[in-house]
Structure formats: C-alpha cells, structure tokens
C-alpha cells in the first residue's frame, strides 16, 4: 500500500483551490529545451473531501496545460467562456470549471487517479467567480518558474 506524501516536506502547493492542490517540483527533463519533451513537469497532485483523499505523483502534466487553464480561467471570469478545462494527455488528472448560472456559481470537477487502469476518483466542489483571479495568478506563477520551452524551434 502506497504511503501518503509528507505535506510538510512538499511545502505550499503551486496551485490550490478548495480541496485540490498541485505541487510542481521541476521539469521532468531539465536538460531538454524542445517543445515535445522539454515541457513535462514532475508533480504531486492531491484532492480530498469528506474522508476521501487521493494522491497522484509523476510527470503527467505539461507547462502548456497549466498555462492554458490559467488563460481559460481569466476568460471565464470575464464572461468570455462558460468553462475552463485542464485536460492533460495523461489520464491521472483532469480539472473542469463550469459556470452553472448567471450569478457566478461554478462547479469544479476534479478527476484524479494514481492508477488509471484500476481506479477512478471524482470530486465536485462549488466555487464562484472570486476564485478565478487567484487561479489565474497561480498558473502565471508556475509559468514564470517553468516557462514553455521550444516555441522558437
């Protein structure tokens, strides 16, 4: 049975909203500058609520997934989109924000698994527009620390 990560050793998450946290540790391939391989990140993700807690670690997300999610959160806050989606190629994590009414209520769905062949976990949270500015800012901070590589190659 896998052990939970030591949260104190992880430090503060790079991205946090309600019961979802994402820690970005480094580039999976720190010496690669190409677009395809150089943008994978080593991360730890956690989602929990009401006695349920799911952790996933590995290199299953790219910088562009986080950048795109942050941009979509900004557009959702501005009323230009009705949803924002972080949907990496790998199946360990998926986060979707959907506007549910005209009052600014948003449903956040987090799908997370450490083993996509044998498990599925989904968490639902109710948030509102006030969360989106902070989410966008957190995504921009991750992009500053881990800029997209290989755009000019």
Image (tube, rainbow, N blue to C red):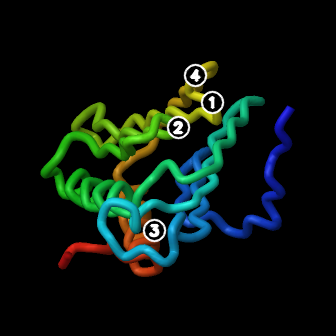
Instruction: Please rate how many residues cluster around mark 4, counting C-alpha atoms within 10 Å: few if below 14, some from 14 to 19, many from 20.
Output: few
Q: Tell me which numbered mark, 1 or 3, is placed earlier along the sequence.
A: 1
Q: Earlier in the sequence, mark 3 or mark 2?
A: 2
Mark number, residue 117 = 4
Look at the picture and state if 114 lies above or below 131.
above
What residue appears at the point 67 percent right and 68 percent down from the top-left corner?
12
User: Which quarter of the figure is the C terminus placed in?
Assistant: bottom left
| Residue at screen point 55% across, 30% down | 123
Marks 4 and 2, Cα distance to the nearest angstrom? 10 Å
The residue drawn where x is 68% and y is 42% is 55
Q: Which residue is mark 3?
A: 138
SS label for mark 1: loop
The residue nearer to you, when weighing 43 against 124, is 43
Judge depth for marks 3 and 2 and give the one in front: 2
Location of residue 133 in the rendering, given as x and y in whole percent from the top left corner: 36, 64
Q: Is residue 20 left or right of residue 67?
A: right
- In the picture of the structure, the residue carrying the numbered disc 2 is 92
Labels 4 & 1 near each other (Cβ < 8 A): yes
Disc 4 or 2, which lies upstream in sequence? 2
Alpha carbon of mark 3 to alpha carbon of mark 2: how far? 21 Å
Q: Quadrant of residue 83?
A: top left
Instruction: Give the CA separation, mark 2 to mark 1.
Output: 7 Å
Q: To which residue does mark 1 refer?
A: 115
Q: In the rendered image, which quarter contains the N terminus?
A: top right
Mark 3 vs 2: CB contact within 8 A:
no
Indicate which label's residue lies in the foreground, 4 or 3: 4
Expressed as whole percent of the image width and height from the top left, the position of residue 63 reads 39, 63
Camera-side residue: 60 or 100?
60
Q: Secondary structure at mark 4?
A: loop
Expressed as whole percent of the image width and height from the top left, the position of residue 52 reads: 72, 30
Q: Earlier in the sequence, mark 4 or mark 3?
A: 4
């Amino acid at each position: 049975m896998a052990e939970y990560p030591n949260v104190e050793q992880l430090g503060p998450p790079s991205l946090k909203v309600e019961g979802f946290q994402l820690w970005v540790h480094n580039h999976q391939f720190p010496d690669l500058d190409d677009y395809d391989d150089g943008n994978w990140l080593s991360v730890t993700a956690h989602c929990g609520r009401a006695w349920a807690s799911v952790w996933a670690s590995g290199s299953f997300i790219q910088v562009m997934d986080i950048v795109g999610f942050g941009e979509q959160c900004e557009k959702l806050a501005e009323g230009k989109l009705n949803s924002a989606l972080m949907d990496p190629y790998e199946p360990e994590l998926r986060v979707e924000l959907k506007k549910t009414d005209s009052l600014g209520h948003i449903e956040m769905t987090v799908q997370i698994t450490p083993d996509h062949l044998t498990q599925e976990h989904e968490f639902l949270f109710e948030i509102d527009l006030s969360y989106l500015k902070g989410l966008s800012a957190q995504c921009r901070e991750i992009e500053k620390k881990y800029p997209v590589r290989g755009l000019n190659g």
